Amino acid sequence: MRTLKLALCMITFATSISAAALAQDKAESATPVVVTEVKRSSFADEVEALGTLKANESVDLASSVTELVTKISFEDNQTVKQGDILLEMDAAEELAELEEQKSFLNEAERQVNRLSPLVSKGAASASVLDESKRVAAGAKARVDATQARINQRIIKAPYDGVLGLRNISVGALAQPGSMITTIDDVTVMKLDFSVPEVFLSTLKPGVIIEATTQAYPEDVFKGEIANVDSRIDPVTRSIEARAIIDNADGKLKPGLLMHVVLQKNPRKALIIPEETLTANGADNYVLVVTTTDGKTSAERRKVELGARQFGSVEILSGLEEGEKIVTHGTMRVRPGAPLKITAVQKDNEPLKELLEQNNSDQKKAAQ
């Protein structure tokens, strides 16, 4: 019986020793983490707004006379050059009148040419020559007026641009104001947007903006502010600005709603990923990687935050450029406990990509 009790005691003691050793090994095992280096990079406060695109030039082409449409020389969405003839209306009566007026003008000019040498020789009165010149001038004015009426019956492109949809047909009786089509110069676009008056100092010509639209969710369109309105709206307390965006590829259309991001107070700042932060009340902390006597561990350090952007935050104090902080594994890390750096995050790479790269590097090292 005594021997059995002694055996049981020895088993219990051995079990305790094994448990203590296991606990010690677990305590001293390094926690795997992913870290990143604190860097100083370009940063700016963002002012967001909504704006509407306008063509650089935009005109509704319409008739100014009542006349029958005889010819249409364009198609929907056609690109045209300045001066291209788009539509012609019946001008037979005006053309006949033009020929008549030109004959009167020719006769009046011949009369002036006959009288001029006679007056210089004293064979004709100067008043007769003056009357002939007056008649010739009147005939010239009537020719110009008739030509102007003919021109009203020919619709031309006022500038290089893209036409809209055709709204009239051959044989239709055009009325003053009848819509024919639209023409837009879309090589560059005007983006008008409003921002609160508190950002007035930011709105200066040349300031860069970035704009996005749900029509092209993957694209970011860059432009710059060209002009700022001269007045602040007293009701909304906002001011309107106009930015110019290049549209050489023709993707953007007038009337498109755009989300505008304006860069305010550009500067160089310490930027860290937002996921590295842990909060305790109103205070924010990060885990800073330290190495002492060859042992890598983490130090919990309080930081002061500045402005935030999507996925990143500005650090005003508490960190130095070049320090390394924990980005993944923060919930398992205890300050002072050993760490194992499995990967270094450089450009916000996904965790899966970092781990795959680390495994690949380990395989290459093993070979």
Image (cartoon, helix red, strand yellow):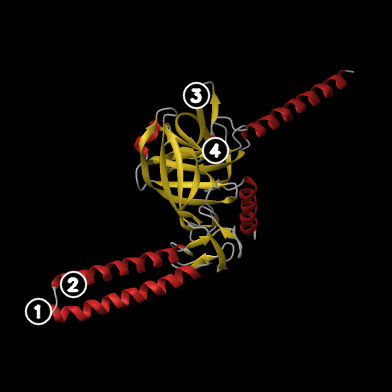
For discs 4 and 3, the disc positioned in front in the rendered view: 3
Mark 2: few/some/many CA within 10 Å (<14, 14-19, 20+): some
Along the line of sight, the residue nearer the viewer: 178 or 254: 178
Quarter of the figure that contains the N terminus = top right
- What is the C-alpha distance between the residues marked 2 and 1? 12 Å
Could you tell me the amino acid type at mark 2? Val
For discs 2 and 4, the disc positioned in front in the rendered view: 2
Query: Which numbered disc flags the more N-terminal residue, 2 or 4?
Result: 2
SS at badge 2: helix
Which label is found at residue 128?
2
For discs 3 and 1, the disc positioned in front in the rendered view: 1
- Is residue 358 visible in the rendered structure shown here? yes
Which label is found at residue 122?
1
- In the shown orientation, is residue 83 left or right of residue 354? left
Residue 46 x %, y %: 45, 38
Which residue, given by chain and number where applicable, does mark 3 sit on?
Answer: 283
- For residue 364, what is the image quadrant? bottom right
Query: Which numbered disc flags the more N-terminal residue, 1 or 4?
Result: 1
